[in-house]
Amino acid sequence: MRMNWRPLLLTLALATTATPSFADDLEELRKLRDTTINLVNALVEQGVLTRAKADEIIAQAQQSAAKPGAATPAPAASSTATGASPPVVRVPYVPESVKEEIRDEVKGEVLAQAKSERWGQPGAFPDWLQHFTWDGDIRLRGEADRFPNDGTPNASVAQLQAFGVNIANSTQSTDRYRVRARFGFDATVGDTVTVGMRLATGGVGSGTNPGTENQTLGTYESRSTIGLDRAFLQYRPVNWFTFTGGRVGNPFFAPTTLIWANDLSLEGFVTRFEPQLGPRASWFTTLGAMPILYNAPTPGSTSSSKWLYAYQSGFDVRLSQRAQWTVGAALYDYRNIEGILNPSPYADTQYNGTAAPFRQTGNTVFDIDGLANLANGTQNTLYGLASKFHELNVSSKLDFGFVGPTHLIIDADWVKNLGFNASDIAARTDAQVNREVRGWQTRVMVGYPTMQPKYSWQAWVGYRYAQRDSTVDAFTDQDFHLGGTDAMGYYLGGSFAFEKNTFVSLRWFSAKQIDGVELAGADSIQSGLPLAIDVLQLDINSAF
């Protein structure tokens, strides 16, 4: 480590030149000497200097002070022994302005060097790690799932599964304990490029739930799975344009979970424009091309890969000093998301790749292998989505700050599936399907806008109504009605931060099906199978 010792030596030299002939200057310079020596000793204690080096510096300063022309007091013993008059000691006068300049110079150079070399930080990160921003969080959850009667008992699991409902329990109360852990970083590369990665708990691989990172405890102490939740490269040449590619999280404005689950991370390529329209408004446009399922071409399969092309545009407007309004409209255009019936009843797998690898509950489905199962008397069902999905979405968020840090926030989402076509569904599935394509969700929240400060709090209440084919059920909320569509009801809750960045939350969801399930297939339509679900969640969250 290189240091500029000139200020220290100069200070030590001045600190050793005073004599009792000038009491005021002596006291001032003694203070300066003591301060400097204390600084050197502090550097030794922090491991910046060795004791030997510190002693050497002090000795050099004292030698400099003892050179001809320097103020050196006469030995007191000699004067007393001889009785002679003490020799005249010449002490150069140091003006106050010079002493002040010396102090400022020493202070400035030492502090600058301490900051640049991170004194007092043993094992400090090397320079390249200073470009990294780290973040992470852990959430502990206790969850109680209940299945109320409300006058009509839920249908049995066997009945529901026979009509394509992806559920394993519809009547038995269940308590679960879960954990979510995430850890990642963003790193700047040059002036315009950022890369990021994040690891998270949850299912890994095709067929697992993409919208949750929860890991249920109680696996006979086997270890939890960890997956790559984020992995992206972002290019931002100017402050109003960004291009991002990889596993990018959710780049769209989504104030509620009507369309996108909170933990969902999308993959693909996203371009965002965000020019400023004035001191109080900005305009944003987000364009995305995202692969949903890659189907490799094979001799026995003609299934196309599934894609999402997304377009969202909106405005962010500051209505007043403490009021903000964000509004956006989006079209989520899924390609090849719908299933196609295998045309032959004899071991035909031509369109197996059009099946949905993961489903929750709600969307109308049909058996892609229905002809083969009907002809052969088998039950090897393979479910695909009956409807196409081109979702028109309007989103809004109003944020009013009214009492200190307390805010009133009103969120709203509305969606309509423009891709639903009864004639097209009948041609692909040989069945008629009811048109259930709308959904909306709203929430009113009072409290702090974030849960970072100690003693921050929030309280909220909301309502959700999502018809069966309003949105793709695989990617929507995971908690309300235990995930999916064809559900309506209310939810409420609150949070309190008992420590900085650490808070407890209590949430209650009460939901029931709107119409019951519907299975599109060969002469098989069923509705009216009830499924009511209440969920209570107690969370402890801590983040850094």
Image (spheres, helix red, strand yellow):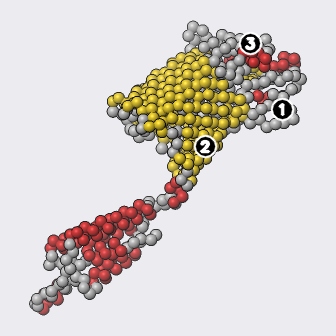
Quarter location, residue 297? top right
- Residue at (57% x, 11% y) in the render: 149
Q: Height in image: 223 above or below 508?
A: below
Question: The residue under label 1 is which amino acid type?
Answer: Ser
Local crowd size for mark 3, using a 10 Å CA cut-off: few (<14), some (14–19), many (≥20): some
The number of numbered badges drawn on the structure is: 3
- Residue at (59% x, 22% y) in the render: 415
Residue 403: x %, y % from top left:
33, 30
Q: Nearer the viewer, residue 489 or 122?
A: 489
Q: Height in image: 176 above or below 235?
A: above
- Residue at (47% x, 28% y) in the render: 397
> N-terminal of the two: label 2 or label 3?
2
Tag 2 near tag 3, CB within 8 Å: no
Q: Which residue is mark 1?
A: 301
Residue 322: x %, y % from top left:
37, 32
> N-terminal of the two: label 1 or label 2?
2
- Residue at (20% x, 80% y) in the render: 92
Q: Nearer the viewer, residue 132 or 381?
A: 132
Q: Which residue is mark 2?
A: 244
Q: Which residue is mark 3?
A: 432
Quick one: SS at disc 3? loop
